[in-house]
Image (cartoon, grey):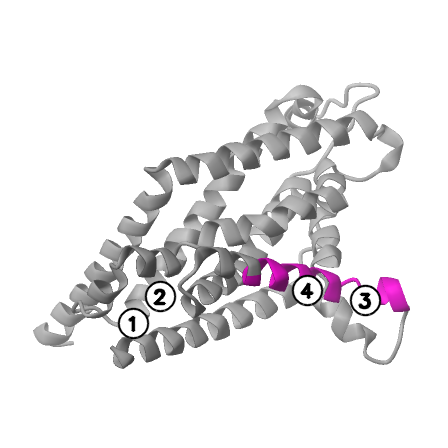
Amino acid sequence: MDDTTIKRSRSRIRAFYTIFCKELRSYLCTPFGWVILACTMALQGFWLQAVLQTMTKATGESVMFYMLGNVNFWFYFIFIFPLITMRTFADEERLGTLEGLLTAPVTTGQIVLGKYCAAYVFYLILWLPMMLYPWMSDLANMYTSMRYGITPEGSIVYTLADWVGPYAILALSGTFFIAVGVLCSALTRSQIIAGIVATCFMIMFYFIGRVTELWGEFPAAPAFHYLSITEQVGAFSRGLVDTRPLVLYFSLAVFTLALTKRIVDYRRWRR
């Protein structure tokens, strides 16, 4: 590559990085992001305590399987994405800064990708406190068993896959759900409307995966099983890592971001 191409590439990376840092600071350096983090941690801790009180050694399942498989978990999990993403474009429109951003010497792709990556990184940060759970309460027995080969009598022992699998599916599904939230924010000037639309989509996607539970098996049932995030969470929580959700969520995330870019492009050239 010649010097001109290298300089252009560096300029694009610098523009993306600037937007990414600005958006990430809007989460980490404002009360908005910390309130979301505190509420998420409180709900995670509440359901972990509830699960530990009901589990027994005879269940043969991991803590994360019961925690993520609980319907109450999905009640707050669905609302995380609209809360994170409803400000991305709608707030810029409300503050009057979107016009300046769209007329700046940056591409639409850099704007969309920078905002998306910042929201996704913040989403991953919300789940980092769960990494401390194995050291809390009786879950420390897992590490005792893995390191010394000792299984305390009456305790519940877990493999590393019991924790890596759930983290993987949460991170994987987040790639698509964050993209949907960014798309909804780009469609409207109102944060409330963006949040409501994103929430409705999350609820619809969740119930699409449970169609077979309501109507049983039928010719199109495999497609609904393929889209079922509850089944994917169950499989990953048992350590059964599958590549099909990887293809599904990455493909949907790329398509959603491409659609978001088109919408922002339309708003950009309309000005």
Rendered position, 181 above or below 3 = above
Q: Secondary structure at mark 1?
A: helix
Identify the amino acid type marked 4: Met
Rendered position, 75 above or below 249 = above
Please give the count of numbered marks on the rendered protein.
4
Q: CA distance from mark 4 to mark 1?
A: 29 Å
Q: Secondary structure at mark 2?
A: helix
Q: Is residue 205 left or right of residue 89?
A: right
Query: In the rendered structure, which segment of residues is drawn in magenta?
Result: 197-215
User: Residue 170 at what x, y percent from top left?
Assistant: 59, 51
Q: Are marks 2 and 3 in contact (CB under 8 Å)?
A: no
Pointer 1 or 3: first along the chain: 1
Quadrant housing residue 133: top right
Where is mark 1, residue-wise? 108
Q: Secondary structure at mark 4?
A: helix
**Category of crowding for the residue at label 2, using alpha-carbon neighbours closer than 10 angstroms: few (below 14), some (14–19), many (at least 20):** many
